[in-house]
Image: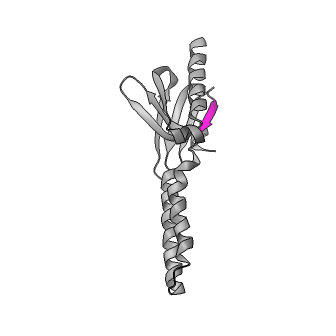
């Protein structure tokens, strides 16, 4: 059972879970790709192995720091944003307090369907970058806000 399911209130259900877009892993991918080109450098095989392992370790560490156990969830009552595998950082926002949602997408973001979702309350703005399908995410938030008004 994950963090989100453990912390749901009575009667609360997960409506939508957003994911980070795969574009965030382009940097680590190219670092790992460098390891394959090191093989073609004429040098000692042990040195090649050490350099390849170094590149793969850097790529893996970078990818894990990007991933970081991120979860972006819309429930029937709240928005829950959780980050971290070992050290956990979570932010919960009651849908009643949500005043505005803004989506920023570059040209590449529009083509690949990712963007930054900015959620504002009275005094704070929280930005969540590289969200896959950001318009579907904001639509689910708006639907849940409207459902709360009907109750």
Residue 66: x %, y % from top left: 49, 52
Picture residue at 48% right of the left edge, 55% below the top: 65
> Which range of residues does the magenta coloring cover?
13-18
Give yes or no for residue 137 being in the magenta stretch: no
Q: Quadrant of the N terminus?
A: top right
Picture residue at 61% right of the left edge, 28% below the top: 12
**Farthest residue toward the top?**
150
Q: Is residue 7 visible?
A: no
Where 132 falls versus 135 (above or below)? below
Picture residue at 48% right of the left edge, 72% below the top: 54
Q: Quadrant of the C terminus?
A: top right
Which of 31/80 is in front?
A: 31
Which of 50/73 is in front?
A: 50
Residue 136: x %, y % from top left: 61, 31
Which of 128/94 is in front?
A: 128
The image's colouring method is one colour
Q: From the viewer's perspective, is 41 left or right of 17?
A: left
Where 140 falls versus 1 (above or below)? above
Which secondary structure is most common in the magenta stretch? strand
Where 101 falls versus 55 (above or below)? above
Residue 83: x %, y % from top left: 49, 45
**Farthest residue toward the bottom?**
44
Q: Is residue 42 visible?
A: yes
Picture residue at 48% right of the left edge, 41% below the top: 129
Q: From the viewer's perspective, is 9 left or right of 97?
A: right
Where 85 falls versus 4 (above or below)? below
């Amino acid at each position: 059972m994950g963090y989100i399911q453990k912390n749901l209130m009575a009667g609360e259900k997960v409506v939508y879970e957003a994911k980070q877009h795969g574009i965030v892993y382009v940097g680590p991918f190219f670092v790992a790709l460098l390891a394959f080109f090191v093989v073609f450098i004429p040098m000692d095989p042990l040195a090649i192995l050490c350099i390849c392992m170094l590149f793969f370790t850097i790529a893996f560490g970078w990818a894990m720091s990007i991933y970081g156990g991120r979860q972006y969830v819309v429930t029937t009552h709240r928005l829950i944003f959780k980050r971290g595998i070992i050290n956990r950082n979570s932010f919960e926002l009651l849908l009643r307090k949500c005043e505005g949602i803004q989506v920023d997408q570059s040209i590449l973001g529009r083509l690949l369907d990712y963007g930054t979702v900015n959620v504002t309350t009275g005094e704070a703005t929280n930005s969540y970058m590289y969200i896959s399908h950001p318009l579907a995410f904001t639509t689910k938030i708006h639907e849940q806000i409207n459902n709360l008004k009907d109750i």
